[in-house]
Amino acid sequence: MTQDSGMLKHTLRRLLGLLPTLLMLITVTFFMMRMAPGGPFDSEKLLPAEIEANLNAKYHLDEPLLRQYFRYMGQIAVLDFGPSFQYKDWSVNELIAQSYPVSLTVGGLAMLLAFVLGTTLGIAAALRQNTRVDYSLMGIAMLGISVPNFVIAPILILLLAVYAGWLPAGGWDWGIASMVLPVVTLALPVTAYIARLTRGSMIEVLHSNFIRTARAKGLPESVVIRRHALKPAILPVISFMGPATAGLISGSVVIERIFSLPGLGSYFVTGALNRDYTLVMGVVIFYGVLIILLNFLVDLIYAWLNPKIRYDEKY
Amino acid sequence: MTKSTDSPVIDPFEAALGVHADKGRSPWEDAWHRLLKNRAAVYSAFIMGTIILLVLLGPLVVSWESDFTDWDFTSSPPSFSSGHWLGTDAVGRDILVRTLEGGRISLLVGLVATLVSLIIGVGYGAIAGYFGGTADRIMMRIVDIIYALPFLFFVILLMMVFERNIVLIFVAIGAVNWLDMARIVRGQTLSIKNMEFVEAARSCGVAPWGIIQRHIIPNLMGVVIVYVTLTIPQIILVESFLSFLGLGVQEPMSSWGALVSDGAQDMESAPWTLIVPAVFLTVTLYCFNYIGDGLRDALDPKDRL
């Protein structure tokens, strides 16, 4: 069997393997939301019983749970997340469509920044292993991991927005200035992880035999690093991209709240606090699918980059 | 060949190590010595110990009650003359006492939730690894599936389901955090179960459950200790994250996350309300991470470079 058809088969099998994950995501989300005490129409003002019954009937909340579940599954199958309970005139699809570009922009830029900065710093530290540069870079990286972004964000706002007045303290107008602080704070922890990861794998690669061979051939160090060491050293970072995305998404929930960005995360939190079932489920499923697909993509890229993985063998 | 204690010949290796081999040193002692050489880890352990003592004993010493509102000093900056050493918040509550008492909750959540994840993870991983075959495949497939789910969102959903009960916060966070532990333990079990001493036990007729308890789990301890130290800060972070969003512990109880959240509200007029709990939280996370790193280097020599 050729490499290509093996790869295709592997891809298809992996794609099929995503289905149970997807099913589980929707099922768990659905039943957890419905187990939650209190309903979406509980407010300070007590609704008359008839009105509440009418509302429940309108949203099919009076049906047996299993029936609601299958109804929801049917809706999801045609990508309809239903109407939002709290934002009366909006469907969840509209809310998601309107807010995801903001989240995607911030998240994508943060990922890019984290990848470029993280690998650069990691390699710089690895090449100067056990020197002062290495120690201070790794110390900063540890700080990046340990300081939560909801601590960094207010401090940066205080310093750069309130005291210095260089950047806006929050809000979103698609301008660069309004992006800087959210992107940087979101990227920091991921950058730190990637830097540590790159350093570790780079050091390991630099100790391996093929690098010794390359050096013995008389190649200049810069060529050894770029041509031979870089790719294998980056591989663990590639496989980290899946979890990193999940981390960025949960981080974005906080970031969007702090910087009052009109993104998916802020809708999720408001929805969770207001028991807006359909909105919360819509956002969880949207993000879940995004994470699942990205993990899948990362796997493919990893397999494509890694010469040790071959699909023509039976495994 | 045995070496007598009065042997004049000293192994150059022993001399280099400065110990007598005939006294013998267990792997645990070796690890301990490696750990003590790691200055960052030792300092972190020291600072961590101080913070734990402060959090436990501090509220008994400081004369303010955490829910006492001192109307003469609302949003007052840190000063010795007012008696509020680290200032007060917008309603005149002493920041120091609130931070220390919040620390109790944060650390407690970290410990208890880690324990929950430890028990589930070690049990699950050891069983999957030891029995192998179909059971292992199915069990690890389940872990893979759950792994791909947006875990934090599930904690938030669990918080809604459980009505923010403090005990259930522990369980909820622990219950979604056992996946890494299960994976690591399973991998380790796979390599341990084929070792001679396990085979010896099996040939003596020890039941599988006995082998897991008596022979596998004790040999997992090194990895587990490392991982526990790294899980505690993660969980403290998750709890403070939830509290920051208003989904964690509720007033009058507090945690570092909740205090940071409060502090961020009035940081422009009273920055100390943000800085004090933020420093405690950050230093704690920093120390745990360094101790975990040090333990990993000490207990897992093959990872050392």
Image: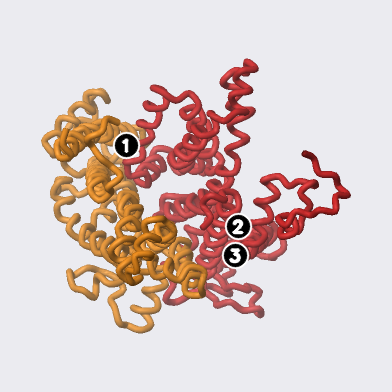
Chain colours: A orange, B red
**Dot 3: few (<14), some (14–19), or many (≥20) neighbours within 10 Å?**
some
The span from disc 3 to disc 2 (Cα, nearest Å) is 27 Å
Residue A155 x, y percent position in the rendering: 42, 72
Give the vertical position of B230 relative to B191 (above or below). below
Give the vertical position of B186 relative to A297 (above or below). above
Residue A76 x, y percent position in the rendering: 16, 35
User: Residue at label 1?
Assistant: A33
User: Residue at label 3?
Assistant: B40
- Mark 3, secondary structure of its residue: helix
Evaluate whether residue B174 shows in this view.
Answer: yes
Identify the residue shown where x is 14% and y is 33%.
A77
**Badge nearest the viewer, 3 or 2:** 3
In the displayed orientation, state which residue is furthest to the front: A217
User: Residue at label 2?
Assistant: B101
Is residue B253 toward the left or the right of residue B243 in the image? Answer: right
Quadrant assignment, res B220: top right
